[in-house]
Amino acid sequence: MKRFIVFLLMIAINLSIISGCSTSKVTDKEVENDKSINEQKELTVKISGPKSPAIIPLLRIIDTNGLGENVKIELNLYHSMEEMVTLATDKDNAFMALPAHTASVLYNKDIDIKLLNVGIWGCMYLTTIDAECKGWEDLKGGKLYIPGKNSPPDMITKYFLKKNNLEPGKDLEIVYSNHTEIAQLLELGNIKHAIDAEPFTTLHKETIDGFKVISDYSEEWKKTEGEEYKLPAFGIVVNGEFAADNKEIVDNFNKSYEQAVKWTNENPEQAELLAMDQLKTKPDLIKKAIPNMSFIYESAEIAKKSLEKYFSILVNYKPETVGGKIPDETFYYKN
């Protein structure tokens, strides 16, 4: 390669002499350092995530060229489980934002991914429009609406009910639905109690009369498991083959993601502007929801303790929720 570059320079020097221009001698070292001659090859890196506020740190990385000027980032949003699995199995898809339990499921299905970090925690709430309802004990004899049967909100809610001496089916009735229908029923006053999540909780506080949070699941988790544990929500995974071939880019991504999470917390208004084109949400909703979304960066190695606690509880209720078993050591990316 060096011989080829020098050969090209010799041609350029000869042409300069023919045209009457003087040219100084150029050394091999100077050629190697000349970016106009030895430019880095541009690389395209594919990143994917859900159409939700979880993608905001990714948008920040794209907006600031967080992976370097020579790295072009291509963003893909998934809208369903099927789309997410398709992207996860695509070796050209380098990084993906997804729920922590889903990362475990994919890994246990032998999809070549590693968990890089966790950036969002908690974001689930026990809510009501009943002014007399003050806590878990007041659910007795009533109905509790949950979005998604056998989902993590379902499993964790049942776990908390048990911790508060309530037995589903005996002390209260569990009804499954989705966020949209639950919100409509609450607004009409047809139901009283429901499990909610951000950014819906922030929206419902403004649009549903009497809507309030009885229990923040992040705080309930610390109460039942200990202050040292957080309740994982969303993390970033990296394609295993990509990680093996591009360690510098992966480590750079991790650093950029940590900075992007910090920026999101410190700049909710700018974060909303960054996300509006992608999310098409109600004005001011994201800005107001960000302080409640627990954007906290932890590398996979640091988050492992909280993740294993979380997985152990899910696997006891329904092993399929995490892919049949708690992920082993190789699930966690090591810097």
Image (cartoon, rainbow, N blue to C red):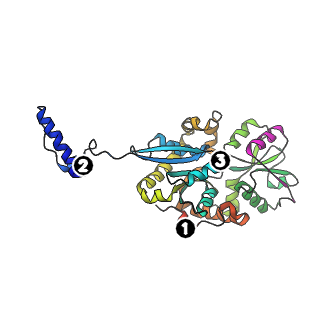
> For mark 1, what is the residue?
329
Q: Are marks 1 and 3 in contact (CB under 8 Å)?
A: no
Q: Is residue 167 left or right of residue 316?
A: right
| Residue 143 covered by magenta stretch | no
Q: Is residue 21 visible?
A: no
Instruction: State how far apart marks 1 and 2 are (Cα).
Output: 42 Å
Which quarter of the figure has residue 318? bottom right
Question: What segment is highlighted magenta in the picture?
Answer: 169-191
Secondary structure category for the residue under label 1? helix
Q: Are marks 1 and 2 in contact (CB under 8 Å)?
A: no
Disc assigned to residue 143: none
Q: Against 219, is 183 above or below? A: above
Identified by mark 1, the residue type is: Glu
- Give the image location of residue 194, x and y in percent: 78, 48
> For mark 2, what is the residue?
32
Secondary structure category for the residue under label 3? loop
Label 1 or label 3, whichever comes before in sequence order? 3
Question: In this view of the protein, which residue sits in the foreground, 153 or 103?
Answer: 103
Q: Is residue 68 left or right of residue 286?
A: left
Question: In this view of the protein, which residue sits in the foreground, 143 or 32?
Answer: 32
Q: Against 317, is 288 above or below? A: above
Identified by mark 3, the residue type is: Ser
Can you tell which of label 2 and label 3 is closer to the viewer? 3
Q: Against 178, is 285 above or below? A: above
Q: Residues within 10 Å of mark 1 (few under 14, many from 20)?
A: few
- Give the image location of residue 222, x and y in percent: 67, 59
Identified by mark 2, the residue type is: Glu
Q: Residues within 10 Å of mark 3 (few under 14, many from 20)?
A: few
Instruction: State how far apart marks 2 and 3 are (Cα).
Output: 48 Å
| Residue 170 covered by magenta stretch | yes
> For mark 3, what is the residue?
80
Label 2 or label 3, whichever comes before in sequence order? 2
